[in-house]
Amino acid sequence: MERFKGRGLKETLDWQLIIGYLILVFIGWLNIYASVQSAESVSIFDFGARSGKQFVWMMTAFGLAALILFVISPRIYESFSLPVYIATLVLLVSVIFLGVEVKGSRSWFEFGPVRFQPAEISKISTSLMLAAVMSQYGYKLNNLRNFIVTAAIVLVPMAIIVAQSETGSALVYCGFIFVLYREGLSGWILFMAGMAILLFILTMTLSPYMSVLVLLGIVSLCCGLYRNRFRKWLMIFFPAVVLLAFLPWGADRIAEALHAGEDAFVHNIRWEYLLAGAGLCALPYFAVRAYRERSGFLWASLAAFVAGLIFIFSVDFIFHDVLQDHQRKRIEVLLGLKDDPAGVGYNVNQSMIAIGSGGLFGKGFMKGTQTTYGFVPEQSTDFIFCTIGEEWGFVGSAATVLLFAFMIWRIIQDAERSREAFTRIYGYCVASCIFMHLFINVGMTIGIMPVIGIPLPFVSYGGSSLWAFTVLLFIFIALVRHERRYFGK
Amino acid sequence: MKLDKSNKLKAGLAVAVSIILAKLFVIQIVDESFKIDASNNSMVYSIIYPPRGIIDDRNGKILVGNKIAYDLLVTPKEVGEFDTLALSRALDVPETFIREKMAGYYRDRRKIGYQSVVMLKQMTPEQYMKFAEISYMFPGFRGQARSIREYPYNAGGNLLGYVSEVDADFLKRHKDYSPGDYAGKTGIEATCEKYLKGEKGYNIYLRNSKNKIEGRYRDGEMDREAVPGKDISTTIDAELQHYGQELMKNKVGSLVAIEPATGEILTLVSSPGIDVEMLADIGSHYNDILANPYKPMFNRAVQSSYPPGSVFKLVNGLIGLQEGVFTPDTEYPCSMGYHFGRNTLACHDHRSPIDFEEAIMMSCNAYFCYVFRGLLESGRYGSVDEALDVWARYVKSFGFGEKLGSDFPSELGGFIPDSGYYDKIYGKGRWKATNVISLSIGQGEIGCTPLHLANLCATIANRGYYYIPHLIRDSKEVEIDDRYREKQYTLVDTVHFHEVIEGMYRAVNSGYASGGTATIAAVKGLDICGKTGTAQNPRGDDNSVFICFAPKDHPKIAVAAYVENASFGARWAAPLASLLVEKYLNGEICEERKPLERRMLDGYLLDKVKID
């Protein structure tokens, strides 16, 4: 591209990202001011109020950004990633013992008036570490040793964060799977992960029976597609699956017709076991076929089927014995299993009302009432999107989401153009982090994700989060600038 | 465009963002139900208080029910100018009350904000209707129904306990309550709070800027129904409890009846007690209750530690038999008391010598001094210290000296001394049997509650075991602890109970002038077995004690009566207990005992009791 020919500041900086960043931070500041509006109006610069404090955070964050862009040499990141990563792990562990307890999780350090969460820094250091390891010469994700190292880099901080009972923050780390996918992880693994989530939701909302049935349908469909027998699948398997779907319903009707009591045999048949059993009985036949045809795919399908069955039957166990009480409740409310607007669902219900009441154009700056009267909890931190939705309407909220999407897209674009693997991988890490935060946070306020308390990047109130995301993003901008200076792209 | 991994990821990003945008579109533009404009409308959560669980007696009669009362709520932000005089008339309160309240709300306006506060509590339906008719004149005021307690029987005030609004301290300890909730504070209301309370529900309404309720939010789909509290079935017999309270009127003491075969408490009277009428409105009677010198809140039946007096001879006799210190045929002499050294433990005038049954029948002090001293000095335990500890272990197996573990709150354990206790008083090795001889007749350092005595009586009626006395029965909704179904065996074998029961039978049924101490308690056909006691009370006249059970075979009821400062056991406690037994077993008092019943009901002993 022509405009990157020069090597000056103007030409080498990715101004689109920087402007996007500034707009988002500004949106956040305005809405923090609007959301903590009380009866007496205070200035947006009042340092007693949150907006004033956020202004301080913003200024310091800009300072940090300038430091990263102009003072620190981008060359150090790669070599410093290991010590930084290890230091972060030490911080993460020590906060469990030395930190203060906030809302049931020990994940904050407190220094006088300032609190910060090592989990925020951990996103940066994990991204750097991942980029450093994966960009090494000769690195292959398919190599088992490399894969284990890579997985450990992500899973170790994730596990420590779960131990801090900050499950929400840990969930963000799942986003790194997109980075691995980009760097060579098989798409099937993503597919499997998606399937696991689908089966989980089906098991919870409908029944294990439906879940087994869907598993059966999808495995057979994949086999059919692989062997170019889609038409056969459509003619035989599909109708069978649809018919089987009505089996428990039909059995109930028959039982009704027979006036069977509550304890009658018909009522107590566990259809999911019957179906799973039937599937397992057919297993040897397919195994023989797979052996004869030497079909690796068929073997894999059979394995996937068995794994799926194990998964489905352990979901119930996981749900009731592994998850903590409040997590279980949140999942139940999200899946609509429990309606409980003043309990766990209260936040979601209120935030959806706030956003919904915004309409197309919103009520206007500082005119929002649901948010300012304190119906929505944590409105300046985790639920800041409510204020945006209520006061700026669909136009404002959609624009904010689109701005985020643009920034993520832009980061991917820059990463792809980069010649250095380190920059590319780091870029994907940044994009994944921002994406996960965006999807979980906004998803939670509009009721498509469970209530998981993580901030909206750049927008939510809080110095720790703003600084972390600023550093995360500007290291990438600095890396990109560094390349452009030398390669001139 | 090539479909490489980067583009697939970008496509994924597009899909995710589309999902968010679509959902935003739905809730912000399509779905009208989220479209409440909060500047004009707001949601009002109207709390539905669940009716508290009902408390039944053992026959299904309602001891504690519910009735409707109304709280008057005010939302100060919505109150405009209004006619205070009209409101005060409608509510039947002085006008100054309303003015002061409103001034108070104004002072706290910051704290209250848009919330509602309670101005008047527990209005009767009639009172509320008067207000409701003209409530349109008073925007910002509204009534909220809640169910309050109602007591169809005047029975068991102290047992049932009261319900009152939770205070700040309670809220701190119980996170699942919120201000304005009610909770059981004493008695069964407190112990069974978790069953009785139920779960609150709410209706969500939409309100416009003119304070008019516009309708249900989302057609009530977000509402939650209140879950009524679970009903409790008690072991109390309401009629008997009421009768017991009548009998104990104007006397200080307790009357406890237990069904021996189950350990279920049929009656538990502490007198003077709290009238159930006071319970319903405890707040306005609280100061009177506290000021009452007889302490009606104090449940003597389980919280008062008394010396048991002569009824304790039964325990000492049983221990002596089990340890082989004497046999039922052993005769001991009594010449107006038991003489040791230069001292005498006096006894009343009766024939001498006598055997064990007669000793129980006539309540001979000397006989049990011989038995107890024989036990302590028998030599087979090594020393008096050891012997006393053996004795204490036996006594504790009857449930004495420790909390019985009933389901009643704040039960007292009482006290049974052992060698360590006397070592502390006299010094080790510096006391002997004669120092503690008063234990033989249930005096001295022994302390027990009337519930302990009733339990002793049930144990004897069962010939050697008891069930932990309890107040709550199994019902459809509530299951009691397994420990209430386990037999608690004493260390004394069943065979030794025969002579004791025979003695108790003869004490009651030997006829006048036979020497039996409790002939006044005899009821034809009921085979009552009883034992009197007269316990010294340092503050005035002796306490009158009596335990009895009936019928002799297959006992259905075991009673302990303990009346403070009422002199001999036969004078008050025995008639009271026997009347209770007769009422329970026969349903009514027979003609020839009517005068006795009259005398008991009319008896006034309060002025014999010294008060602080």
Image (tube, helix red, strand yellow):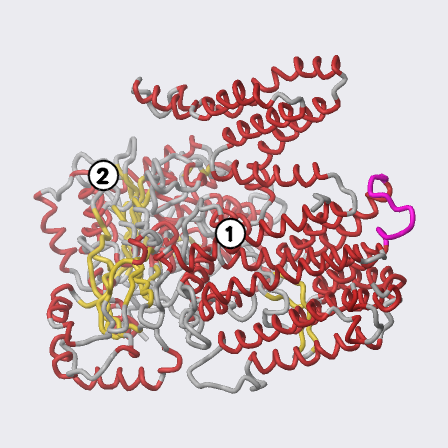
Q: Amino acid at mark 2?
A: Asn
Q: Is residue B120 left or right of residue B218?
A: left
Asked if A318 appears above or below B334 in the picture, the reply is above
Residue found 13% across the figure and 83% down from its top: B85
Q: Is residue A61 magenta?
A: no
Tell me the number on the disc at residue B409: none
Q: Is residue B208 above or below residue B396?
A: below
Identify the residue shown where x is 36% and y is 77%: B112
- Residue at x-position 59% and y-position 69%: A460
Q: What is the x, y in percent for residue A259? A: 29, 20
Q: Residue furthest right?
A: A137
The subunit letter for the residue under badge 2 reads B
Question: Which contiguous range is marked in magenta?
Answer: A133-144
Q: Quadrant of the N terminus of chain A?
A: bottom right
Q: Is residue A50 something one can see in this rendering?
A: yes
Estimate the x, y position of residue A281 in percent, counting from the top left.
Answer: 61, 15
Residue A448's disc number: 1
Is residue B347 shown above or below A337? below
In depth, the one of A13 and B457 nearer the eye is: A13
Q: Chain of mark 1?
A: A
Residue sitting at 72 percent across and 17 percent down?
A: A290
Residue B507 drawn at (x, y percent):
27, 42
B231 to the left or right of A470: left
The overriding secondary structure of the stretch rendered in magenta is loop
Q: Looking at the rendered structure, which numbered label has been put on residue B509?
A: 2
In the image, A1 versus A88, the foreground residue is: A1
Q: Quadrant location of the C terminus of chain A?
A: bottom right
Q: Are callouts 1 and 2 both on one chain?
A: no
